Each structure stands twice: as C-alpha cells, then as structure tokens.
Amino acid sequence: MNRHSIVYFVFISIISFFYIGSINAQFLINNGNSIVVSTGAYLVVEGDIVNKTATDDGRIDLDGQILLDGDFENYSTNEVFINQEAVTDGLVVLRNCGMPQSIKGTSPIHFENLTILGSVKTLEVTNASVSDVLTVNAVLDLNSNNFILFNSNPSSIQYVSKYIKSETTSFDGYGTLDWRIGNNTQHYTIPFGTGESNFADVPVSYTSLSAGFPSSAGIKFATYPTGDRMNTPCPNGIFSLTPYDPMKVADRFWITNADAYSSIPTASLEFKYRNQDIENGNSITESELKAVRISDGGTAWNEVAPVGVVTVANNTMSVQNISPSDWRNNWALTSIGVDGDFWVPGAYTPNEDYVNAIFKPVFGFQPKSYQFTVYNRWGERLYDTSDYLSGWDGTYKSQLAKQDVYIWVISMIRPDGMLYKYQGNFAMVIWE
C-alpha cells in the first residue's frame, strides 16, 4: 500500500500486529497489540483513537503521521508510542477545527512530536509529554494537569497562534508546563494565555544564565488570576500577602517551581500582566510595581527584597540575575511607594561567590538619619552602621559567624521627620 492509497473504514479494531501504509478511518481502537505507521505514511482518523490493554498493552511505533479529528485516549499501562528514536520523526496532529478534542485516559501519552490546530485541545490526564516539538496553533487547556516538554531546546515550542492556558488556581490544582531545561543556558518563552484574548496575553519568559543540575531537571511554570481583591486563593501553602496590602498587589500569581533541581540555575524572568490584573478596584501605581516572592509554606513575601523593572508601555515585569539562594517558587507584583516602604530579608546566605553577600535593608526612600545594628541571640552586638546603603558581611572579629538566627534593630528618622524604631530577626544559612 503506497503513501497515496486510501482505504475507508467505518471502524477499525486492532486485534493483532498491524502495519499501516496510509489509511483513512472513522475510529481506531487498539486492543492490546502493535501498530506500525511507517515513514511517509499517514493514518487519518476522523473519530477517536483508543489505546487499550488486552494480553499486552496497545502500542504504536510511529515514524509517519497520525491526523486525528477526535480524542486520543490511553487506557493501557504504557504511554502508547514505543521505539522513539534519537531523531524523532513521528508526528500526531490534533486537527479538528469545529469540535474540541481531548487527550485523556488512565495513563499519559508520550508523543514524539505534537501539533495542535483548530479547536480547543483539553488535557484530561496529567503528565502527557512531547519528546521533541510541540507546535501551538490552537488553545491547549492544561486543565489543572501537568504537560511535560523533554526537549531542552527553546525551539521545543513552535508558537504559531492562540496560547497555552494555565489559569487554574491552587485550590483547583495548577495547570503546569513542565519544561525539562536541564543544564541548558538559553532563553525560553511559554505562550500562556488567559482565554480572554485570542493570543498569548500573559506569556512568561525565562533565561537560564548558568547550568543547573541534574540535566534531567526542569521548571514547572504556571500562572493564575485571583478571585477577589484580597488575592485569594494564595499559592499552595501560603495563607496571606504579609507584609503587603492586598489592594496594592496585582490580581495574579506566577509559579516557577524549580524543586527538581538539586542545583538551581542563576536565571532571569519576565512576567506579562494585563490591565485587568492591576486595576479592578486596586490601589496600584503601575510605575511603582515590583516583583515579590515567597517559598512554599513561607509566611512573609519579603524573604527577599522586592526587585524588578516594570515597563508600563507593554505591561511587563523583568527580574534579572536571580541567584539560586534567592529563587522562590511563588511570585506576585506589588505597588511600592517611593517614600513609604523598606524591606529586611528574612534569610541571608553569605558565601564566597559575592552573590547575596551583604545583609542589609532595602529602601524605597532615603532616611534623614539612620542606625542599623545586628545582635546574636545573647544580645552581643556584632555589627552596626549609620550608612543606610551599607550592610553586614556575616563576619564578627574577622571570622564568619555561625549558622543561627540573629536580631536586627533599626532606628531612623523617615522623610516625614518622625523617629521610628523597628526590630526583627533573620536566619543566616551557611552553604557548604
């Protein structure tokens, strides 16, 4: 059977080994056997493909193309596509332009290459994956599931139009794009969209500036809008926006989960937000937006000082050169007044790489007078300064202090002419 020949079936049920040149069918059910689609061949299925287990798992060796108008369902215990070569030439095209399509079943499907075009494609099983290239020319609704890209090259996503939809909250379960970037040092863009526009209106960009470890690791990206002006629900394990005013926090969170890394890369991030995320009754001055972050289970969003450069013209927040010690899984944007706030980190990691090497407050104003002091838990003074731009390098009597919890005290006259005193504690963590 050559590439151009077409055989019409109302229904195909595979009950034995089946070799395909080119076939057009309405439905395809594989009852636990092998299908081979050879190089240059097309399998056109106008209905669903259902992969099942009988004596053995159903499986497909795909070197040609499958053009599918229905759902792709996997009820076997494997991931359908076997014998994936180093050069991944197999392609599945979800092509229905009129009716929605789903990837579903009891087990995920591991595609070599996947193209989506036309109508909305919904993920109804978690950990579906692509070895090489995902071509986005339709909406891919993650639907609270995880989708994995194993190709660490930025070209793993070929964006044509529409978007990948995350948008589900921590309460419903994140919709995550799990990109196995590994030790690559390149620039990546995830074309997230909200569904309120016909394009990727909230993309996330990530640039890896150093090699992470292990090479099989990656980052799970997600974003979602909050349901009210109090910004609920917060990310997993987070119960407030302390110390920030919810009315000054954008109504959207971003998730950048790097837990798969034992050594997190130094990286940069860029978040895009919509006007609706900062308006909607909030008290936000857009030009004063900064990015804030918190660790999973953290209690305060000022573990690391607010950072970032906002570009009002295109609604983006850029955070550059995030060190591994400053990486957090959860991000938000808050409006910071130029003469009202300062922040003291809740943790400090001195080391010899000169990243995060000084413990000091970060100010949005210049105090008229200032005194900053660090004490150990026994009340012994380890450091003090009257220069608000200076900080403690973690040493006492020319020796690095031990890992412990320390106390800071600030006494200052703010721009309003009033004397204020503040006190708190922080953890000093020594990286071996």
Image (tube, rainbow, N blue to C red):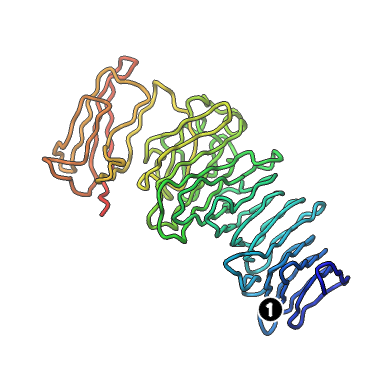
Amino acid residing under circle 1? Thr
**Quarter of the image holding residue 16?**
bottom right
Vertical order, 422 against 352 (above or below)? above
The C terminus sits in image quarter: bottom left
- Residue 374 placement, left or right of 26: left
**Which residue is identified by label 1?**
53
Most foreground residue, 136 or 305: 136
Disc 1 packing (10 Å; few <14; some 14–19; many ≥20):
some
**Quarter of the image holding residue 131?**
bottom right
Q: Residue furthest bottom?
A: 55
Q: Residue furthest top?
A: 417
Vertical order, 51 against 150 (above or below)? below
- Residue 214 pos. (x, y %): 41, 60
The residue positioned 22% from the left and 38% from the top of the image is 393
The N terminus sits in image quarter: bottom right
- Residue 251 placement, left or right of 429: right
Most foreground residue, 82 or 430: 82
The residue positioned 56% from the left and 45% from the top of the image is 189
Name the secondary structure under disc 1: loop
Vertical order, 27 against 346 (above or below)? below
The residue positioned 77% from the left and 62% from the top of the image is 68
Most foreground residue, 235 or 137: 137
- Residue 320 placement, left or right of 396: right
- Residue 33 pos. (x, y %): 71, 80
The residue positioned 71% from the left and 54% from the top of the image is 116
Vertical order, 135 against 30 (above or below)? above
Most foreground residue, 161 or 47: 161
- Residue 431 pos. (x, y %): 27, 52
| Tag count | 1
